[in-house]
Image (cartoon, helix red, strand yellow):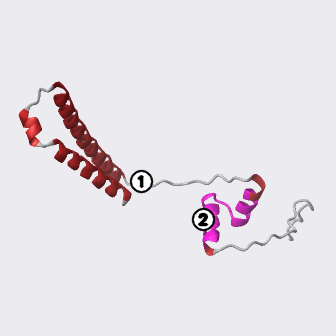
């Protein structure tokens, strides 16, 4: 038994050939696979409709996310302690009522250097990831 003939308007008689780099081809191949289509179907749909909805599977390591949330909490706590310290010093200097242990624990210059060093360390640690 032979295959039934397609209607004349359903036949694909024209061929379009394009050349792709290995990178371009792998991107198209992966995207077509994610959309659960053949490469030909994907390319036709892209050309005719301009957009193909692909499905992405997000895999997350829960332990790693919990660890990062904990680290962010610690960073926030440190930042609050630094802000509280500087607010105490600025209030103390504006009212001229200073607790000598507060001012003597760090001089304003060393506190400023400590804060700038902390900011530099934080920036360098976030830029490397």
Residue 45, magenta (yes or no): yes
Residues in magenta, as a range: 23-46
Question: Which residue is farthest right?
Answer: 8
Horizontal relation, residue 96 to residue 129: left or right? left
Task: Name the residue that disc number 2 marks.
Answer: 30
Residue 91, magenta (yes or no): no
Task: Name the residue that disc number 1 marks.
Answer: 60
Q: Are marks 1 and 2 in contact (CB under 8 Å)?
A: no
The relative height of residue 100 versus residue 129 in the rendered view (above or below) is above
- The percent coordinates of residue 106 (x first, y second) are 12, 43
At 81% from the left and 69% from the top, the residue drawn is 16
Distance from disc 1 to disc 2, alpha carbons, whole Å, reads: 21 Å
Q: How many labels sit on residues?
A: 2
At 63% from the left and 57% from the top, the residue drawn is 35
At 17% from the left and 47% from the top, the residue drawn is 110
**Numbered disc 2: secondary structure:** helix
At 72% from the left and 74% from the top, the residue drawn is 19
Quadrant position of the C terminus in the picture: bottom left
- The percent coordinates of residue 54 (x first, y second) are 62, 54
- The percent coordinates of residue 59 (x first, y second) are 45, 55
- The percent coordinates of residue 115 (x first, y second) are 24, 47
Question: Which residue is farthest left?
Answer: 101
**Numbered disc 1: secondary structure:** loop
Q: Nearer the viewer, residue 84 or 114?
A: 114
Horizontal relation, residue 83 to residue 20: left or right? left
Prevalent SS, magenta region: helix
Horizontal relation, residue 70 to residue 109: left or right? right
Quadrant position of the N terminus in the picture: bottom right
Where on the picture, by quarter, is residue 74?
top left
């Amino acid at each position: 038994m032979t295959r039934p003939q397609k209607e004349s308007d359903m036949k694909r008689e024209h061929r379009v050939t394009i050349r792709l780099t290995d990178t371009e081809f792998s991107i198209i191949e992966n995207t077509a696979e994610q959309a659960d289509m053949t490469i030909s179907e994907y390319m036709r749909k892209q050309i005719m409709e301009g957009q193909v909805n692909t499905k992405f599977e997000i895999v997350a390591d829960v332990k790693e996310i919990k660890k990062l949330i904990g680290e962010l909490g610690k960073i926030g706590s440190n930042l609050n302690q630094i802000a509280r310290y500087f607010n105490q010093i600025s209030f103390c200097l504006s009212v001229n009522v200073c607790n000598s242990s507060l001012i003597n624990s760090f001089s304003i210059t060393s506190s400023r250097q400590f804060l700038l060093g902390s900011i530099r360390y934080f920036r360098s640690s976030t830029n490397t990831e």
